[in-house]
Amino acid sequence: MTSRTLTILGATGSIGASTLDVVNRHPERFRVVALAAHSRVDAMLNACTRVRPRFAAMVDVEAADRLRSLLRGAGVATEVLAGNDALLHLAGLPEVDTVVAAIVGAAGLRSTLAAAQAGKRILLANKESLVMAGALLMRTVQQSGAQLLPIDSEHNAILQSLPARFGGNLAGCGVRRILLTASGGPFRRIALERLRTVTPDQACAHPNWTMGRKISVDSATMMNKGLEVIEAHWLFAAAPEQIEVVIHPQSVVHSMVEYIDGSVIAQLGNPDMRTPIAHALAFPERIDAGVSSLNFFDLATLHFERPDLTRFPCLRLAYEALRAGGTAPAILNAANEVAVDQFLKEELAFDRIAAVIEEVLGRVPGQAGGTLEAVLEADRRARDAARACLAIA
């Protein structure tokens, strides 16, 4: 039995909460050394009180001051750090061997890269790190001896469905293609003309998963699946034509791998993020995740369909950015983050999200993306272009 020490980046989000739930079921196997979040003081206070980490970091300085005071009053000796640099410090702590990278969006790139540079085992939920800087992150992982284990349900399902001898060579393992499943979100059947008037609350009402608001909107537009296509390209060295998206509304089959002999191996389970998290935490062993067994007798049908790219243009844009390469995926991601933020503020219609992204991709030329500086510059230019499109000061 392997014992592991953890830093959890994004500790107050849904992935962080699920990770802490699994960890708390196995105190003999896992010790949380550090937690990090942006500004949710109450959630961080609760987490620190439960697991008593050595360090806690809040990006927001005022939130860090408040947390420090509350922990002192509660008699918890956790040292509180503040700012973005604190995330980099916690990602590279020498006493930590495993970093859960669960910060949402581009904000998670630097800390994920810091964990890779430090040679950590990285449990990756921050797909944007690979979308923005896939070549850089994978090269860093290889050079430092880090290990990258996906905890997105789809990519973790692919990992489970590949042979143990997989070493980045799909053809060498007899793999024909990867099949990424998608629920289709809450608007899979809605009339297209109604998309203009859907509200943020409607977009965030995912039929199967409980997630944060940004990723819930991405699921509704299927940009989340587009980002996962790009992520799969880097994780599994798969060409765009080897990655196919399949809508599966029940979210029971989490993804599949098709082999050249016609076999298809799939990973199934109830839609609960604790399953992929537990798989990666204990890999290559298995531990209890607290997830209920899948009852096959309650499954009436398993339905599959092709995604409609007229309904889900964000998926088309993601494939186009992947094929373009370089900084195009970083531009795609930045434009999407700005557009989704405006939608959540009720300043942009839902069906305009894809239009803003496409306009930014046309305005901002892609370049080679082999350095962090190039990626961050592309991200900045794309955000500026998106704000210009939306007339945001």
Image: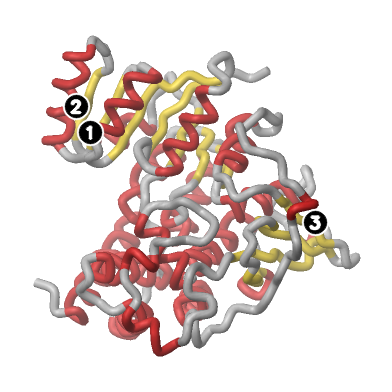
Q: Which percent across, then down, holds residue 112?
A: 41, 43
The amino acid type found where label 3 is placed reads Ile
Asked which quadrant contains residue 180, the reply is: bottom right
The amino acid beneath tag 1 is Val
Q: Which residue carries the number 3 mark? A: 265
Q: CA distance from mark 2 to mark 3?
A: 47 Å
Dividing the image into 4 quarters, which one contains the C terminus?
Answer: bottom left
Residue 41 disc label: 1
Give the camera-side residue of 227 and 71.
Answer: 71
Instruction: Answer few, some or many: residues within 10 Å of disc 2's Cα (few below 14, many 20 plus, some between 14 and 19).
Output: many
Disc 2 + disc 1, Cβ < 8 Å: yes
Say what secondary structure mark 3 lies in.
strand
Which corner quadrant of the image does residue 90 belong to? top left
Residue 365 appearing in the image: no
Report how far apart the C-alphas of labels 1 and 3 lie in the structure: 43 Å
What secondary structure is found at the residue carrying circle 1?
helix
Can residue 77 be seen here? Answer: yes
Dot 2 or dot 3: first in sequence order is: 2
Residue 301, position as x, y percentages in the image: 75, 65
Q: Is residue 160 above or below residue 187?
A: above
Label 2 or label 1, whichever comes before in sequence order:
1
* Mark 3: few/some/many CA within 10 Å (<14, 14-19, 20+): some
